[in-house]
Amino acid sequence: MKTKIPELSPNASPADILRIGIEAAGGPVSLACSFSLEDVAIIDIAHQAGIKLGVFALDTGRLNEETYEVADALKVRYHLKIEWYFPRHEDVEPLERSEGLFSFRESLDKRHACCQIRKVEPLSRALKELSGWVTGMRREQSITRGDLKAIERDTLNGGILKINPLIDWSEEQLVSYSEEQSLPKNRLYSQGYRSIGCAPCTRAVKEGEDARAGRWWWENPENKECGLHRR
């Protein structure tokens, strides 16, 4: 029988959402960590609240050096164990040999194919033994995330629970929390980045652009998901 989605108070804090979601999952739960401001805040919130939460990361092979620096800083600060997952070389090698290193910029289908190999398939392995996973997604981030729920069922990954504790936070709240707690922060944020993924698919945003305008900037806003959070 599938786990029932728990009801939440309208005033539930991120720590409340985490605690209730993990309890409802009834088994191991881990944060999918990209070392963003959101994910670092969730690690700190869980740490301060005494909430046991696993952490895993997807190393796509195309991450920025600055992202790895945050991972190391978190290991030191929280004595954190990070479970790393990597794309299968037997998938990456044929892709790059036949399509080249930047095929993902040629069409949406080719970008999805790259994300499938580098992100979606490794994620499926990371989630295989979990009862739930935690993300740093916020409704404010983009039009593709406007109908998110704090705790929902991930029908694409066996019906496990998906917990989004920062769902209602604004970017201002997030930045304030990060500064107040002196959290490790990716140096790219100070260079105009507001959402950080793979290096070739991410750039700084211009004044007035939304937070995810720098992700796959050659695509339309409604397409800007990598497949990890398809709905």
Image: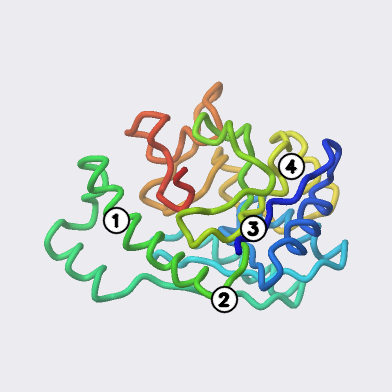
To which residue does mark 3 refer?
A: 134
Q: Name the disc covering residue 114, or none.
A: 1
How would you rate the neighbour count of disc 4 (Cα within 10 Å): few for under 14, some for 14-19, many for 20 or more? Answer: some
Label 3 and label 4: CA atoms lie apart by: 17 Å
Label 3 and label 1: CA atoms lie apart by: 23 Å
Label 1 and label 4: CA atoms lie apart by: 30 Å
Q: Earlier in the sequence, mark 3 or mark 2?
A: 2
How would you rate the neighbour count of disc 1 (Cα within 10 Å): few for under 14, some for 14-19, many for 20 or more? Answer: many
The image quadrant that residue 118 belongs to is bottom left
To which residue does mark 4 refer?
A: 174
Residue at 36% x, 70% y is 87
What amino acid type should be assigned to the residue bearing mark 3? Val
Label 4 and label 2: CA atoms lie apart by: 25 Å
Task: Please provide percent x and percent y for residue 59.
Answer: 45, 67
To which residue does mark 2 refer?
A: 83
Q: Is residue 173 above or below residue 19?
A: above
Q: Is 153 left or right of 96, judged from the image as shown?
A: right
Along the viewing direction, whichever of 73 and 215 lies nearer the viewer: 215
Residue at 57% x, 76% y is 83
Q: Earlier in the sequence, mark 1 or mark 2?
A: 2
Which mark is in front, 1 or 4?
Answer: 1
How would you rate the neighbour count of disc 3 (Cα within 10 Å): few for under 14, some for 14-19, many for 20 or more? Answer: many
Task: Please provide percent x and percent y for residue 217.
Answer: 38, 35
